[in-house]
Amino acid sequence: MRVGVITFPGTLDDRDAARAVVVGGAQAVSLWHGDADLKNVDAVVLPGGFSYGDYLRCGAISRFAPVMQLVIEAANKGMPVLGICNGFQVLCESHLLPGALTRNSDLHFLCRDQEIEVVNNQTPWTNAFKQGEKIVIPLKNGEGSFQCDDQTLAMLEGEGRVIARYVGENPNGSRNLIAGISNAKGNVVGLMPHPEHAINELTGPSSQGLGFFTSILHAMVK
Amino acid sequence: MAKIVVDVMLKPEILDPQGNAVASALPRLGFTFATSVRQGKRFEIEIEGEPTAAQLAEVEKAAEVLLSNPVIENYVVRVEK
């Protein structure tokens, strides 16, 4: 089981994401933004950071990276893709996921441990969780406010495509407390908080983030 | 040489925290005229000679694909004299 982790110029969390993939039980394969080859990976993680300096809009330039053309094509054919934080922004800019991530409602960059509820455990990235399971993982971003029009919101809610919600006070102004969503097939998931920073209690608030990385293994073995 | 300007604004229904922050800063400085402020982006694109219809169509396309995110933003393309 090979899980690719893409590094763009300005990506920060690729090392942690690769380590989470390994601790989850899969092989991590480094992919470079300029690669014209997905190296036979079975799934891809787009990690967090500030790809291309967040110039223009977060994720707007990464979308056109050579490797993303292959990721978009593979994702449309059903390959599992997880975008975390900046990776979520890249997936929205790539139109693999609907909506957009905009500036936090209070304008502050947030960095804190955040409780979220997994509200759809039927995706390849969330099947290790119980439906409604609450976990605590880091949230760290400046542009994490999920926005979309009313019609899109009704579609996401109606089709069960909201996969995680913030618990308690809305940290960033996201509509319906949305922390993560999936595409219609469920193989593409975007998540604003960071499970890869919560795989070990020595360095994170919990080890509950690991579930996203063991999920993908379950999904592949099934 | 001509200058093509692309103005990109958040759609009216999208929350603009930066515009709101500016709107609340104005009265603190004694400027009491504003009832609302929205903040956007302006791109100034220089080209050789007068723009042709084909070139303007290309700029429109670039505005749609790259300069704006049509999910949350609107854009206007114009030639500056």
Image: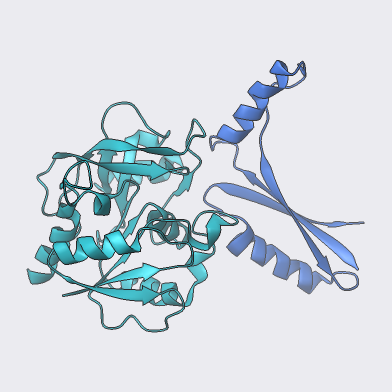
**Residue B20 appears at what percent x and percent y?**
61, 28
Q: Residue at x 46, y 49 (%)?
A: A100
Front residue of A202 and A118:
A202
The image quarter in which residue A53 lies: bottom right
Image-based side of A57 in relation to B31, left or right: left
Image-based side of A40 in relation to B69, left or right: left
Front residue of A188 and A86:
A86
Q: Vertically, is A140 above or below B26?
A: below
Q: Residue at x 23, y 63 (%)?
A: A19
Quarter of the C terminus of chain A within the rendering: bottom left
Q: Which chain is cyan?
A: A
Residue A122 visible, this orientation = no
Front residue of A6 and A116:
A6
Q: Residue at x 44, y 59 (%)?
A: A90
Quarter of the N terminus of chain A within the rendering: bottom left
Q: Which chain is blue?
A: B
Q: Residue at x 26, y 51 (%)?
A: A197
Judged from this view, the residue extending furthest toward the left is A222
The colour scheme applied to this rendered structure is by chain
Q: Vertically, is B36 above or below B18?
A: above
**Residue B12 appears at what percent x and percent y?**
60, 37
Front residue of A28 and A43:
A28
**Residue B31 appears at what percent x and percent y?**
77, 19
The image quarter in which residue A172 lies: top left
Marker count (numbered): 0
